[in-house]
């Protein structure tokens, strides 16, 4: 079968898509691909929402429905379009994409690296195996089936522990485990997906990431033919119970020394997993003993981060990822120093709320100095799915301010102005 969109010499890039609910807005991909590659949209879901997006995306490139196909069948179908590369922006699909890439002999993560990137338990083991500092970690399924191991962990682990999915994003399905009794309860539950527990990475004794900020950052990285380009370090607002992300800002508010230490840790983690190409979002926590990797995400950072990078550095991170995926060599050195601070703030429902009962103050948010955009989501009467983490927000507020002090003032005003109540 010949491609339905002649490429006129433009390289074809197979872009593997999950459900639109688990993706960046797909039309962002269309914009990034313009002039760089001809997309071959490979869909893996069989639902009405995916079908609707497939009809939209079909205007910019061929669409291949790979739902239900084995990797071999999908590789054969994709191969008919003679792609120059393959990519996915959802880490859950990385192992499948790696298998197809291997069959087609396309550049991508090895299957071993893909498994370590998608599975946080395997990733922790790989980092520890290469000498990086990690918290204690255990597979929940192993604890469920090994009473002796469970007894050992319950006795010796440094509580609190953190329960989290082995594969997941956006603070989903995370919970704090404060006691051995609670650990035993959670281990006994029939989780629908593989889970893990790990020791809580301790907070630093001093606010080294700036007053009022979260103690973790992310390093935004592009790797091209083994050459690592660190685009910058992104700061975070403090987490909201239970482990919900509450917003970010670029650049981070850290000393030059800590900035360099974070970048060095990110590069060491990338080397540990044998990554030679790709866009990566490496989350790292500052501790008194030095930076500790939280996780490596095999995709650009989410939320408003792509927009912040475009504003601060003039880099379209999706387009850069596509260029890497079709084999181009990219290296960024001497990037401009950001002249201001871009930020986003999530206004979240109260912890434990299952229904939003009232929301006041959203309408006036755009009058706050520095606020550029407000996206309202949950309102009075809407149900809250606690398993969705920060994706269950009342409002996402983003903007640009001259400095970090102005960012703090804007955040404080946003959170004091919007009053949200909920019921369990």
Image (spheres, rainbow, N blue to C red):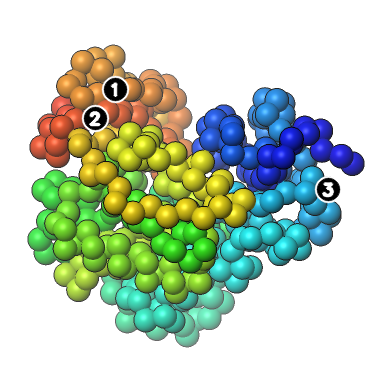
Q: Quadrant of the C terminus?
A: top left
Q: Quadrant of the N terminus?
A: top right
- Secondary-structure class at tag 2: strand
| Residue marked by disc 1 | 372
Nearest-to-viewer mark from 2 and 3: 3
185 on left or right of 324 = left
Q: Position of residue 189 (x, y in %)?
A: 52, 61
Asked if residue 12 is positioned above or below residue 411 in the image, the reply reads below
- Secondary-structure class at tag 1: strand
Q: Residue at x 42, y 35 (%)?
A: 392
Earlier residue among tags 1 and 3 = 3
Q: Residue furthest right?
A: 1
Asked if residue 24 is positioned above or below residue 160 in the image, the reply reads above
Q: Are marks 2 and 1 in contact (CB under 8 Å)?
A: yes
337 on left or right of 303 = left
What is the spatial separation of the Cα atoms under label 2 and label 3, in whole angstroms? 46 Å
| Residue marked by disc 2 | 400
Q: Closer to the camera, 79 or 133?
A: 79
55 on left or right of 236 = right
* Residue 422, disc: none
| Residue marked by disc 3 | 80
Q: Residue furthest front?
A: 9
Q: Closer to the camera, 423 or 415?
A: 415
């Amino acid at each position: 079968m010949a491609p339905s969109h002649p490429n006129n010499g433009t390289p074809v890039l197979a872009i593997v898509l999950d459900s639109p609910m688990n993706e960046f807005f797909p039309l962002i991909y269309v914009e990034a691909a313009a002039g760089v590659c001809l997309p071959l949209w490979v869909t893996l879901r069989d639902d009405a929402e995916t079908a609707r997006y497939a009809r939209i995306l079909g205007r910019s490139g061929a669409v291949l429905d790979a739902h239900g196909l084995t990797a071999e069948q999908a590789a054969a179908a994709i191969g008919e379009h003679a792609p120059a590369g393959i990519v996915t922006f959802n880490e859950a699909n990385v192992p499948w994409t790696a298998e197809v890439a291997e069959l087609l002999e396309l550049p991508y993560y090895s299957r071993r690296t893909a498994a370590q990137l998608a599975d946080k338990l395997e990733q922790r083991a790989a980092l520890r195996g290469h000498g990086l500092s990690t918290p204690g970690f255990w597979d929940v399924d192993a604890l469920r089936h090994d009473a002796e191991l469970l007894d050992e962990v319950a006795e010796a682990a440094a509580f609190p522990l953190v329960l989290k999915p082995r594969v997941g994003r956006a603070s989903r399905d995370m919970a704090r485990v404060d006691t051995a009794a609670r650990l035993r309860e959670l281990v006994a539950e029939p989780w629908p997906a593989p889970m893990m527990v790990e020791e809580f990475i301790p907070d630093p004794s001093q606010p080294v990431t700036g007053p009022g900020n979260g103690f973790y950052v992310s390093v935004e990285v592009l790797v091209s033919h083994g050459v690592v380009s660190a685009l910058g370090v992104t700061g975070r607002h403090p987490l909201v119970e239970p482990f919900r992300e509450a917003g970010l800002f670029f650049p981070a508010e850290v000393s030059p020394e800590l900035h360099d230490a974070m970048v060095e840790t990110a590069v060491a983690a990338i080397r540990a997993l044998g990554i030679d190409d790709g866009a990566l979002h490496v989350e790292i926590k500052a501790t008194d003993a030095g930076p500790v990797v939280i996780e490596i995400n095999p995709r650009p950072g989410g939320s408003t981060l792509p927009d912040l990078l475009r504003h601060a550095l003039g880099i379209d991170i999706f387009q850069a990822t596509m260029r890497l995926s079709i084999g181009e060599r990219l290296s960024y050195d001497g990037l401009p120093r950001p002249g201001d601070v871009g930020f986003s703030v999530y206004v979240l429902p109260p912890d434990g709320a299952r229904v939003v009962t009232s929301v006041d103050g959203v309408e006036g948010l755009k009058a706050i100095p520095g606020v550029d955009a407000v996206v309202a989501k949950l309102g009075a009467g809407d149900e809250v799915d606690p398993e969705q983490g920060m994706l269950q927000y009342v409002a996402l507020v983003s903007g640009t301010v001259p400095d970090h002090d102005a960012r703090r003032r804007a955040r404080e005003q946003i959170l004091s102005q919007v009053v949200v109540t909920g019921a369990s």
